[in-house]
Amino acid sequence: MFTPGTRPRLEPAAPGPAVAVVIEASAPITAGSRRLATVADFGYGVRYSLARGRNHVMVPPGRYRVMLYSQYTFWQVGKAWLDIDTTRGPVLFHYASPYTIYSAGAAGFEPQQRPGRGAMLAMVSAAVLIPLLLVGLGVLLVR
């Protein structure tokens, strides 16, 4: 079991032919008007940039703790970890980036729901309702 915030146990990759790994990635996080780059980090300097949809990558056979995240300026946001074993052949897994930079991502062998919808709705609602309440309060006080 992996505890976030600690370094994952890394096993060196076995020599031999590369194994196919298919990563099904959701839509990336949107910060303002730009979409953040989504990254799959297999360790040992094996890192791939992911696009929305199916991403086919090749890695040496071995066991990996894949860290998936989006790069936001200097910070890695929407982190999710998944242990995979490529010694038995090709692997397919899914990554769902969160709606906001404030939530963690979700990774698994089954399709994942994008986390953070509630946080996004709360922020948008607050941005709309607080000014309306202030204007309404101002109108009531002027009367």
Image (tube, rainbow, N blue to C red):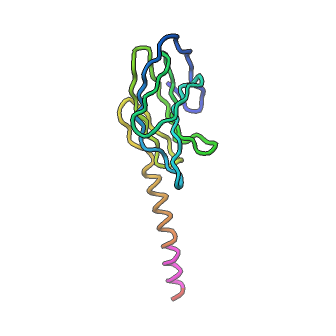
The image shows residue 106 at horizontal and vertical percentages of 44, 37
- Quadrant in the picture for residue 5: top right
Segment tinted magenta in the rendering = 133-141
* Farthest left residue in view: 110
Name the residue located 59 percent from the left edge and 25 percent from the top edge. Answer: 45
Depicted 125 relative to depicted 143: above or below = above
The image shows residue 30 at horizontal and vertical percentages of 50, 50
Numbered marks: total:
0
The image shows residue 133 at horizontal and vertical percentages of 49, 73
The image shows residue 59 at horizontal and vertical percentages of 49, 21
Name the residue located 43 percent from the left edge and 36 percent from the top edge. Answer: 95
Q: Is residue 94 left or right of residue 135?
A: left
**In the image, residue 68 lies in the stretch drawn in magenta:** no
Q: Is residue 108 left or right of residue 133?
A: left
Name the residue located 41 percent from the left edge and 28 percent from the top edge. Answer: 22
The secondary structure that dominates the magenta segment is helix
Depicted 56 relative to depicted 105: above or below = above
* Farthest top residue in view: 15
Give 4 or 16, whichever is nearer the viewer: 16
* Farthest right residue in view: 74
* Farthest bottom residue in view: 143
**In the image, residue 140 lies in the stretch drawn in magenta:** yes
Depicted 83 relative to depicted 11: above or below = below
Give 135 or 18, whichever is nearer the viewer: 18
